[in-house]
Image (cartoon, rainbow, N blue to C red):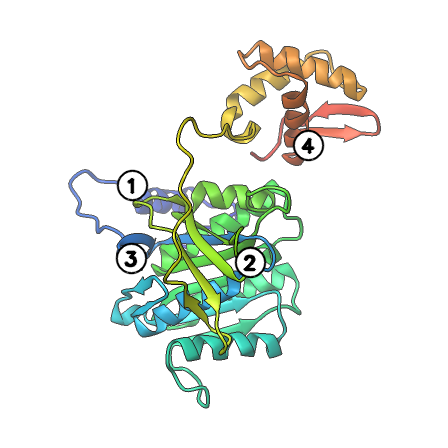
Amino acid sequence: MEKTDNLILSSEELAICMEESAVSVTSAYEHSPVVLMVDDATIGTLGNFSASIGKAKSKKTFNISAIVASALTNGTILHYRSIFPEDKRKVLYVDTEQGRYHCQNVLKRVLRLADLPEDKEPDNLVMLALRKYSPKMRLAIVEHAIGTIPDLGLVVIDGIRDFLYDINSPGESTDIISKLMQWTDDRQIHIHTILHQNKNDENARGHIGTELNNKAETIMQVEVDKDDKAISVVEAVHIRDREFEPFAFRINDDALPELVESYLPKVKVAGRPAKKPFDPYKEISESVHRAALDAVFADGNIGGYDDFLERLKKGYGMQGVKLGHNKAVKVTTFLGNKRMVIKDGKEYRFNPDYHY
């Protein structure tokens, strides 16, 4: 039964959903089949999704070309190793950023990496260039493709950001991640998405990046090596399986990514790890946020930024969360991005119907 947020379901339909979702202690459930690996570490299984993140010009698309070529051959390209079942050998590659001319160049690169002919259409690869469409149309086209392409096993979405109108919208981000979870579960496929990192830090961009970090089974980072700008380094920043050894590639004279065999991963500094920046989303639960905001706005709307900051400190302090000035500023930004607090002119008001 299709899962949807667009319809009000009847009691009978909800009962079917409950029955489909029930977990039995006596039933036998299959472990998600492993389909993508880096060396001996699992990065992708059927029924799940993963992501690559990186800053502009880090060679993310070259890295993805190697993943797709590996899937087409069910072989090893760079360090990527694919083991898709025979009835899951089709690959759908969706590009939202480039026109058909540049997408064709990517397609030819994939075929060369896979040692497949460039003068005939590949049997197991469908590529869509969706740059000219609106986010809503892109989503609809991809949903149709996923639902109709037979023997589909891998879907690559180069530019998940372009499925949203607002990259910082919690509602839109949740909807897109819900779609990824629905598609992967219903079709038993693996989806790999690509997203830019913020310019000033290592985090994936926008609220969609936060949601990807929370839900993806693997997040890989592609970055230009600090000592040699000609090579790009791939490492796991989040992985459910054991971490793989970082590896590096360069672009050769044939415009193809090739391994840098001599690359040695940077030695991690011994001692206490550097403290991560304060994150109101990860470090404060939703229930604490709500209780604190109830106290902050107990007397109604708040006029003025300075007064708002002081009341935040007191309200969160009542919940056992101590906020200095810098942390209070970060909480203010977080609450605004989440639409938990809305600024009307110079006034701040609590939005109790926020979408977390």
Give the CA distance from mark 3 to mark 1: 36 Å
Asked if one can make out residue 4 in the rendered structure from this viewpoint, the answer is no
Which is in the foreground here, disc 2 or disc 1? Answer: 2
Alpha-carbon span between mark 2 and mark 4: 38 Å
Mark nearest the camera among 4 and 3 is 3
Q: Earlier in the sequence, mark 4 or mark 3?
A: 3
Q: Position of residue 59 (x, y in %)?
A: 53, 62
Mark 4: which secondary structure? helix
Q: Which mark is residue 22?
A: 1
Identify the residue at horizontal 45%, vertical 45% (top origin): 10
Q: Which residue is mark 2?
A: 229
What residue sits 34% from the left and 62% below the top? 80
**Is 72 or 303 nearer to us in this picture?**
72
Front in this rendered view, residue 81 or 85:
81
Please report contact status of discs 4 and 1: CB closer than 8 Å, yes or no. Answer: no
Q: Which residue is mark 4?
A: 336
Instruction: Quickly name the residue at label 3.
Output: 39
Identify the residue shown where x is 31% and y is 47%.
20
Instruction: Name the amino acid type tagged 2.
Output: Lys
Residue 335, image x and y in percent?
A: 65, 29
How far from the left and from the top, in percent, is residue 127? 50, 74
Could you tell me which quadrant the C terminus lies in? top right
Is residue 266 shown above or below 67? above
- Position of residue 5 in the picture relative to residue 31 (left or right): right
- State which mark lies toward you, 3 or 1: 3
Mark 1 belongs to which amino acid?
Ala
